[in-house]
Image (cartoon, grey):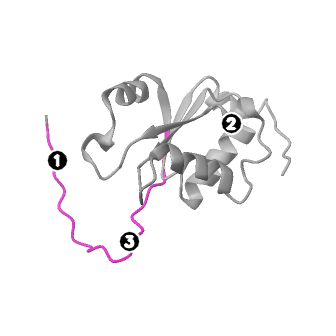
C-alpha cells in the first residue's frame, strides 16, 4: 500500500513537530487513524497510543499484535515512521485514565492533538450511567 505524501499540505503543517494521543487504537477506527498519521503525516513528532491490558495480554503485547496483525496496514511503513508510535498503558474507564504518573506527565507536556476513538464494545451495557464529577 504505497501512498503519495504531500509534505506541503496544510495537515502536515498543522501536525508539524506536534505529538498526538489516540485512544481506542487497537480498534478498527483507531488503527486506521494511527496508520494514516504515521504513514502520511511525516511532520508529526510522536503518536502516543493508549492501550489497556486485556485477556491476559499486556499493553505491549497488544501493541505488538496491533502492528503485526492489522490487515497488513503497518507492514510497509518505514521503521523511522513506525518508531513514532509509542504505546502507553492506560484504561479510559479508570480514574485518571489509569495512567502512571510519568506517562501522565509525558502526555501533558507533549500532546497537542487527541483522537478519542475508544468505545464500549460489550453491547450489553446499561444506558444508565453514573458520572462522578470532581470540581477540584
Q: Is residue 129 magenta?
A: yes
Give whichever of discs 2 and 3 has the lower sequence position: 2
Mark linked to residue 122:
3
- In this picture, residue 40 sits left or right of residue 111: right
Q: Is residue 135 left or right of residue 37?
A: left
User: Element under label 1?
Assistant: loop
Give yes or no for residue 78 being in the magenta stretch. no
Residue placed at 52% from the left, 50% from the top?
Answer: 62
Residue 133: mark in rendering: 1
- For the point 38% across and 75% down, the residue is 123
Residue 122 position within the rendered picture, expressed as x and y whole percent measured from the top left: 38, 71
Where does the image place residue 49, in percent across and percent down from the top left? 51, 41
Q: Residue at x 74, y 33 (%)?
A: 79
Gap in Å between the C-alphas at discs 2 and 3?
Answer: 30 Å
Q: Is residue 4 above or below residue 120?
A: above
Give coordinates of residue 68: x percent, y percent. Answer: 67, 51
Kind of element beneath mark 3: loop
Label 2 sits on residue: 82
Bounds of the magenta span?
114-135
Q: Secondary structure at mark 2?
A: helix
Amino acid at each position: 500500500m504505497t501512498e503519495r505524501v504531500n509534505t506541503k499540505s496544510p495537515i502536515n503543517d498543522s501536525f508539524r513537530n506536534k505529538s498526538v494521543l489516540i485512544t481506542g487504537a487497537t480498534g478498527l477506527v483507531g488503527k486506521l487513524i494511527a496508520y494514516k498519521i504515521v504513514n502520511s503525516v511525516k511532520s508529526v513528532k510522536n503518536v502516543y497510543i493508549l492501550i489497556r491490558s486485556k485477556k491476559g495480554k499486556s499493553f505491549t503485547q497488544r501493541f505488538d499484535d496491533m502492528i503485526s496483525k492489522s490487515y497488513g496496514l503497518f507492514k510497509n511503513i518505514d521503521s523511522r515512521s513506525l518508531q513514532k508510535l509509542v504505546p502507553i498503558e492506560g484504561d479510559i474507564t479508570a480514574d485518571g485514565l489509569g495512567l502512571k504518573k510519568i506517562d501522565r506527565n509525558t502526555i501533558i507536556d507533549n500532546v497537542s492533538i487527541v483522537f478519542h476513538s475508544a468505545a464500549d464494545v460489550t453491547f450489553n451495557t446499561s444506558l444508565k450511567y453514573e458520572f462522578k464529577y470532581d470540581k477540584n
